[in-house]
């Protein structure tokens, strides 16, 4: 029998030094998580430890240098537990944008110009720009439509555009612009039926749900550690044989001829990889507390992988309830429209909205003045905002509030009160 789930948010907050900061006498409400989360003390300590005690480049016959390999291997093992893959299938660069650009470069070498590339309007520009560039170079780029009514991917359009000529299908798992979670597993299956390689942008998804890359069956998956309590590191998963097959941009030296180092564009950010290890350990440490609440989700899992999955289940359960309160609260305020998929459809705890009579800039300014961190604009989900009619500077995009496990019910109440006051002219 599963233990009753009761999330101890204070215990989580105690691990984040940023949660002690105040504006106008109140703790800052970090509802800007989709842009990047706050960092636990253990991650900060680990980065600092590397930089003070272990700082060197790899390959030297001295103590500090040996730590580079330890950290790099450790980060691969940690991410393997985070994504459900083997350490040898994980690589790192500065950002997901950089990783995607590197993959696109390799795809451009692999395929001739008759290759069709399928992406969608649901994407962050990080997962559309590489394909736009390939389109400019003459590849057949097709962009699947966003159904603006359901605010989900138009599956009819996906099926229509998925042809035997399609070689790359690159899709968003969860939208940072709408919060929509897409059925990537189904789309991957369909893409594989026509022989295409699949890339999944899980940058937003990875902050809120456990990931099992083998279960969804994708060939490539991207995520970024700064969205899940770590430093600015782009993480890439790739199926082992594809790593060996693709011709990546790298320095073409013997020591990177095989294995996941083939992804690396220069010296990895070792100090930040040390932080990635601790970010995963942080999630696992929370998961250990709540594992008994999710026994059915943890069947067959053990060790850190089990605790990571439990941790993400705990975050999802806690954040989803708060996000629901936020959505329903916002909808009760006159002039507020909340966007994203219908209630009951898969979504992240990211809430996007507009307030009649106010620009999104004015809305987030009002929130910011009260110490509530929120984003506005398009957050690089340019195609979504264009499709929804809020594109460009004139359109203003949307205002966005996103949950993280250190957010509280009080944060939500304060955000709702601020929007209510704004509308009431207070
Ligand atoms: C869905 C999504 N994809 C990609 C990115 C880009 O990630 P990075 O900043 O690591 O390039 C972001 C960043 O916000 C995002 O939300």
Image: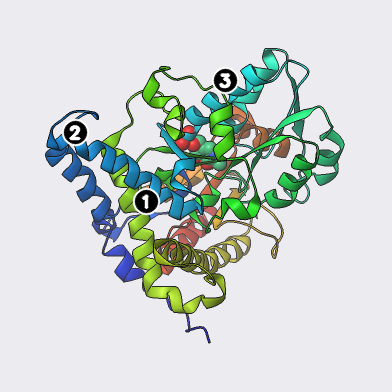
- Number of other residues with Cα within 10 Å of mark 1, as a class: few under 14, some 14 to 19, many 20 or more: many
Label 3 sits on a secondary structure element that is helix
User: Of marks 3 and 2, which one's residue comes earlier in the chain?
Assistant: 2
Which residue is located at x 34 percent, y 52 percent? 279
Give left or right: position of 48 versus 395.
left
Q: Where is residue 121 in the image (x, y as percent from the top left)?
A: 70, 36
Q: Residue 65 carries which label?
A: 2
Q: Distance between the residues labelled 3 and 2?
A: 31 Å
Q: In the image, is the residue at mark 2 within 8 Å of ligand 1 by its beta carbon? A: no
User: Seen in the image, is 172 located left or right of residue 154?
Assistant: left
Q: Residues within 10 Å of mark 2 (few under 14, many from 20)?
A: some
What's the residue at 49%, 34% (across, down)?
A: 96
Badge 3: how crowded within 10 Å, few (<14), some, or many (20+)? some
Residue under the image location 60 percent in, 50 percent down: 353
Numbered mark located on residue 229 in the image: 1
Q: Comparing marks 3 and 2, which lies closer to the viewer?
A: 2
């Amino acid at each position: 029998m599963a233990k009753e789930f009761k999330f101890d948010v204070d215990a989580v907050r105690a691990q984040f030094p940023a949660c002690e900061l105040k504006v106008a006498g109140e703790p800052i409400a970090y509802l800007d998580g989709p842009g990047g989360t706050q960092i636990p003390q253990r991650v900060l300590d680990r980065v600092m430890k590397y930089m003070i005690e272990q700082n060197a480049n790899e390959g030297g016959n001295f103590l500090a240098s040996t730590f580079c390999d330890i950290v790099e291997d450790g980060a691969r093992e940690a991410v393997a537990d985070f994504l459900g893959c083997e350490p040898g299938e994980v690589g790192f660069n500065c950002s997901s944008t950089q990783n995607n650009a590197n993959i696109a470069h390799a795809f451009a070498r692999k395929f001739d110009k008759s290759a069709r590339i399928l992406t969608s309007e649901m994407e962050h520009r990080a997962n559309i720009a590489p394909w736009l560039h390939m389109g400019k170079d003459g590849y057949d780029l097709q962009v699947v439509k966003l159904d603006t009514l359901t605010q989900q991917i138009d599956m009819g359009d996906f099926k229509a555009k998925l042809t035997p000529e399609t070689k790359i299908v690159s899709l968003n798992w969860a939208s940072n612009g709408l919060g929509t979670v897409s059925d990537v597993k189904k789309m991957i299956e369909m893409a594989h039926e026509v022989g295409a390689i699949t890339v999944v942008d899980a940058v937003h998804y990875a902050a809120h749900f456990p990931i099992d890359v083998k279960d969804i069956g994708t060939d490539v998956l991207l995520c970024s550690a700064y969205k899940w309590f770590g430093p600015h590191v782009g993480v890439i998963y790739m199926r082992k044989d594809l790593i060996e097959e693709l011709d990546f941009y790298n320095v073409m030296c013997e020591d990177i001829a095989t294995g996941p180092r083939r992804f690396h564009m220069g010296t990895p950010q070792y100090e930040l990889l040390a932080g990635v290890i601790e970010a995963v350990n942080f999630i696992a440490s929370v998961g250990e507390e709540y594992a008994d609440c999710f026994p059915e989700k943890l069947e067959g899992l053990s060790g850190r992988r089990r605790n990571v999955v439990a941790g993400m289940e705990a975050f999802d359960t806690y954040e989803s309830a708060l996000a629901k309160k936020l959505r329903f609260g916002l909808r009760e305020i006159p002039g507020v429209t909340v966007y994203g998929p219908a209630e009951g459809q898969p979504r992240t705890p990211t809430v996007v909205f507009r307030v009649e009579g106010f620009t999104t800039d004015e809305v987030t300014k009002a929130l910011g003045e009260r110490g509530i961190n929120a984003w506005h604009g398009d957050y690089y989900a340019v195609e979504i905002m264009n499709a929804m009619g809020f594109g460009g500077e004139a359109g203003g995009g949307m205002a966005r509030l996103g949950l993280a496990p250190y957010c509280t019910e009080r944060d939500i109440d304060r955000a709702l009160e601020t929007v209510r006051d704004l509308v009431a002219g207070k």
